[in-house]
Amino acid sequence: MCGLKNLYLKTDLGVVDCLGEVLGIGNFEEVLKHSVEVELPYGNCRIIDIEALIRAKEAMNRDHDRITVKHLKEIIKQQKLN
């Protein structure tokens, strides 16, 4: 075991963050509980759900994350209206 906690892969589709733990959510098992499967052009992939993403962004507490949280909360609001 190499002991890596985070791995960032640059792909043709963009950067993929492979994290051993997500601040605000927890370890792999906790993150898995808060993930959804999405279909991508090259196969299926699990990503964290929007509520978990908000918790992670709030835990990071960086300026750009606070802006992103506002946008994500507005997305949730709009989804509930439709």
Image (cartoon, rainbow, N blue to C red):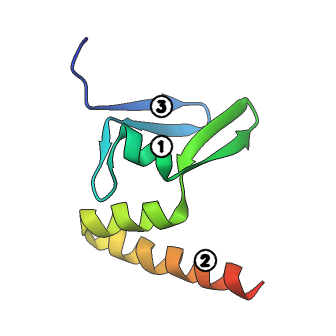
- Mark toward the start of the polypeptide (2 vs 3): 3
Q: Residues under labels 1 and 3: Cα distance?
A: 22 Å
Q: Amino acid at mark 3?
A: Lys
Q: What residue is at 69 percent from the left and 78 percent from the top?
A: 79
- Indicate left or right for 35 with 68 as reference: right
Q: Residues under labels 2 and 1: Cα distance?
A: 22 Å
Q: Position of residue 58 (x, y in %)?
A: 31, 70
**Label 3: how many residues lie within 10 Å, few (<14), some (14-19) or many (20+)?**
few
Q: Residues under labels 2 and 3: Cα distance?
A: 27 Å
Residue 4 quadrant: top left
Q: What residue is at 44 percent from the left and 29 percent from the top?
A: 9
Q: What residue is at 32 percent from the left and 35 percent from the top?
A: 20
Residue 57 quadrant: bottom left
- Residue at the spot of label 3: 10
- Residue at the spot of label 2: 75
Above/below status of 15 relative to 26: above
User: Which part of the image, by quadrant, shows the C terminus?
Assistant: bottom right
User: Which part of the image, by quadrant, shows the N terminus?
Assistant: top left
Circle 2 SS class: helix
- Mark toward the start of the polypeptide (1 vs 3): 3
Q: Are marks 1 and 3 in contact (CB under 8 Å)?
A: no
Q: Amino acid at mark 1?
A: Leu
**Farthest residue toward the top?**
1
